[in-house]
Image (cartoon, coloured by chain):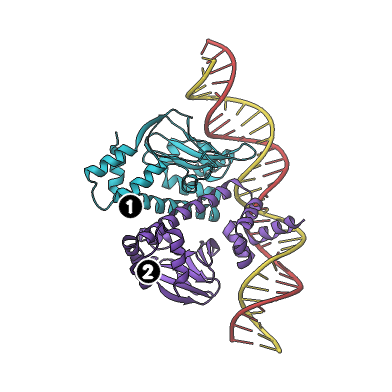
Chain colours: A cyan, B purple, C yellow, D red
Amino acid sequence: MHENLLDYIKQRATSPLTNDEEALIVAAFHPKKLRKKQYFLEEGNVCKYVGFIVKGAMRQYSVDDKGVEHVVQLYIENYWASDRESAVMLTPSKYYIDAWEDTHLLVATVADMLDLIEKVPSFGQMTRLMDQRSFIVSQRRLNSTISNTAEKRYEEFADNHPQFIQRFPQHLIASFLGITKETLSRIRKQAIK
Amino acid sequence: MHENLLDYIKQRATSPLTNDEEALIVAAFHPKKLRKKQYFLEEGNVCKYVGFIVKGAMRQYSVDDKGVEHVVQLYIENYWASDRESAVMLTPSKYYIDAWEDTHLLVATVADMLDLIEKVPSFGQMTRLMDQRSFIVSQRRLNSTISNTAEKRYEEFADNHPQFIQRFPQHLIASFLGITKETLSRIRKQAIK
DNA sequence: CAAAAGCGTTGATAAATATCAACGCTTTTT
DNA sequence: AAAAAGCGTTGATATTTATCAACGCTTTTG
């Protein structure tokens, strides 16, 4: 049940996990199933949970004053779903997170996460890497958005994340890239030539 | 000499620093002065240093194939200058970091930083907060870039970071926002009405 | 002090992207 | 099985933003 998560942690830690440590982790993470379209987090709520995706696909998005959705994150297996801003700052979230496919999660409270970081060094290492890695990915994406045309951004994304292209419909990819679905459709049409 | 840095750490740690800990930190950070336009990091080099800005202003930017600069970060007092991607992944940097004003830094090697994280718990807490905070800021910026028009992005930025508006010329702010200097000039003209 | 570089602005025009509306096809719901 | 919703596409048009060129003013440099 918790194998994927334990493997994930072991791969990112410098020393192996003791049995006690494994037990602490297993105790903190509860399995949860979400059907397609069910919310993991809704706008206005403080994000109190962190979810590790064992199987499935999710998305994080905001809804602007015109009711338009803007996808800010796409998640698949071995990704962590949560609104870090809300969880860290304890402020109401500006985002929704919901299941795009039926999804199997391992969920811990933010409080339990902090506890694990303190008690299990490997877990602390893992979350530190996670934080750094998240920032790097976000920086890259930002840099790409600032520097490149929509076309180049799509190509870059498709090259680096083919799994997402297969897994999510085009209009979500478009939103994630910050362009309209029509523009993405036209970009793809050109690219084929 | 190291007061600003020590204060910065103390504000972010849950327990006070011991004398020994302070000594370790002071030993790791060396003062360095950069004159305006001097490089702290050049493209192609692995980022081996992290700089805490005591006084001054710096910027991080990439140069695209057409020779156009794209500002990705602006730094002032109490900011950390470094290319985290390069430092963490040990890959050649895609960025330049240089001094915009004459700048007074406290510089540590990435290796010494790792050492301090291990030996000084408060320092570890501080860097963890730094990582989280960086990600949050980056996420917000990305979300703003994806969701808003240039005008709204500028307003948001000007509201949240008036210090930067005063400190850096408009063409750098424009580049940071991912728009041209002409467009920013026109946006500001409109805004006055 | 003269020359050069840096900076912000403006105008004219071009390019990129969004918007709106409609259609066909597939999948889901009733 | 019929109706509805979801998805991608296309066309026509509007809007946003970039590009190119030029100018005046200020600051820096030789």
Calculate the distance from the C-alpha at mark 1 to the C-alpha at mark 2. Answer: 24 Å
Q: Secondary structure at mark 1?
A: helix
- Left or right of residue D25, residue B57 in this image: left
- Measuring from the top left, give residue C26's x and y in whole percent: 49, 24
Whether residue B168 appears in this view of the structure is: no
- Left or right of residue B182, residue A103 in this image: left
**Quarter holding the C terminus of chain B?**
bottom right
Q: Residues within 10 Å of mark 2 (few under 14, many from 20)?
A: some
Q: Residue at x 56, y 45 (%)?
A: A178
Q: Is residue B111 positioned above or below D12 on the image? A: below
Return the residue at label 1.
A125
Q: Nearer the viewer, residue B32 or A111?
A: A111
Return the residue at label 2.
B22
Inspect the image, locate mark 1, and give the three-letter code of the amino acid beneath it.
Gln
Q: Is residue B113 positioned above or below B35 on the image? A: above
Residue A107 numbered tag: none
Q: Nearer the viewer, residue B164 or C3?
A: B164
Mark in front: 1 vs 2: 2
- Left or right of residue A50, residue C14 in this image: right
